[in-house]
Image (cartoon, rainbow, N blue to C red):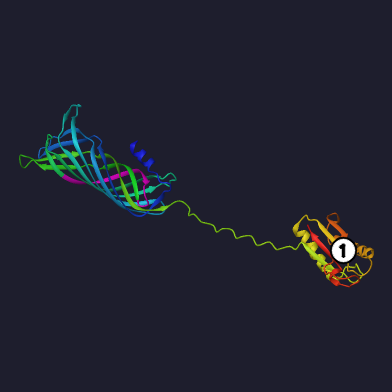
Amino acid sequence: MGAAAVLALTTPASAGRLTSWYGVFEGGASAIQDFDISQYATPAPVPVLSTLETDIGWAALASVGYAYNNGWRVELEGGYRHNEFDQLVDAVGVGVPADGSLGEYTLMANVLYDFPSVSGVTLSVGGGVGADYARIDAGALATPVQDDRVSLAFQAVAGLSMQMTSWLDLVLNYRYLYVTDFEFSDAAAVPPNINHLDTEDLQKHTLTMGLRFGSHKSDAPPVVKSAPPPPPPPQAQVARQYVIYFGFNKCAITAEADQVLSEAAAATRTLGSVGVTIVGHTDTVGSRAANQKLSVCRAGAAKSNLVSKGVAPAAIQASGAGETQLLVMTGDNVKEPQNRRATVDLN
């Protein structure tokens, strides 16, 4: 419960998968399941069968390994477990205190798999095979023995790991260790007798916590910063006033005037819904009444031309100003081409 709380409280905002080489240091508790032993002395063996119970002991382990990008890991693990004897229970169930200890050095080759995680806490499972070098100190038992032996060992591993930094993990591991039987022996006090202590298969449970050092590769997709959108192209400037010119005493649209009016019609489509104001003008030749009538004719001619180019008639207001708004100030009866005009304003 406490270890799980530590893992939860230290969860980083973004975790990654362990990659490349790593090293682990762990410590914790070790418990041996009760196991049967056979005690006897040679050359005239009379076996005494009993069950040996042990106290919960301690364990220290260190590993070095390599993590692949696909979640698999291989490692070499070395460890030491130490347990004190508790009591010896005979065949009829009577127990007596037992003094002694069992120390075991293990060297295991492990293969493990890390399941992908989005929470920052990674579950790992795996197993290993190796050797168990055990030393027993059973000097106070019925058949005193102090000896060491090596036996074949197998283990299953399940663990949780939590990334604390880019190079450090907090790990919590459970190991089930299965060791084939041992046959310990020691010289008896009366030569040439030999004391023997044979064990059944040992089953050990180890719970450890530790630190793992190694680099990580982030599982989060890389953040790609998109370039800001380019600024919109500058809007083309659309003229809002156009001027066309007429021949002397005429209101017919010339080729040049028709081209200008085509530009004005295109501008109305670009600008959208606009109003068009057309005002016709004359020079000072002729009477004021005649010039007024001529200016109205010129404005009307410009309107008809725009309507033929797609401009709605209702959007056009046409009027004449006669000779009252001269562009070039002249005296009476002066032919001035710039005054013979019509202006087209887009409102």
Image location of residue 161, percent across then percent down: 36, 45
Q: Nearer the viewer, residue 133 or 281?
A: 281
166 is within the stretch colored magenta? yes
Q: Is residue 308 visible?
A: no
**Hey, which quadrant is residue 51 in on the image?**
top left
In which quadrant will I find the C terminus? bottom right
Chief secondary structure of the magenta span? strand
Q: Quick one: which residue is furthest to the front in this view?
A: 331
Which residue does the numbered mark 1 point to in the structure image?
Answer: 324
Q: The magenta stretch spans which residues?
A: 148-167
In the image, residue 244 sits, relative to residue 61, either above or below, namely below
In terms of secondary structure, where does tag 1 sit? loop
**Hey, which quadrant is residue 303 in on the image?**
bottom right
In the image, residue 47 sits, relative to residue 282, either above or below, namely above
Image location of residue 48, percent across then percent down: 15, 33
Q: Is residue 64 visible?
A: yes
Residue positioned 19% across, 40% down in the render: 102
In which quadrant will I find the N terminus? top left
**Hey, which quadrant is residue 299 in on the image?**
bottom right
In the image, residue 274 sits, relative to residue 284, either above or below, namely above
Residue positioned 94% across, 65% down in the render: 290
Q: Nearer the viewer, residue 5 or 325?
A: 325
Q: Nearer the viewer, residue 306 or 176?
A: 306
In the picture, measured across the screen, residue 200 lies left or right of residue 144, that is right
The three-letter amino acid code for the residue at tag 1 is: Thr
Label 1 environment density (alpha carbons within 10 Å; few <14, some 14–19, many ≥20): some
In the image, residue 104 sits, relative to residue 329, either above or below, namely above
Image location of residue 240, percent across then percent down: 76, 61
In the picture, measured across the screen, residue 65 lies left or right of residue 187, that is right
Q: How many marks?
A: 1
328 is within the stretch colored magenta? no
Image location of residue 30, percent across then percent down: 25, 39
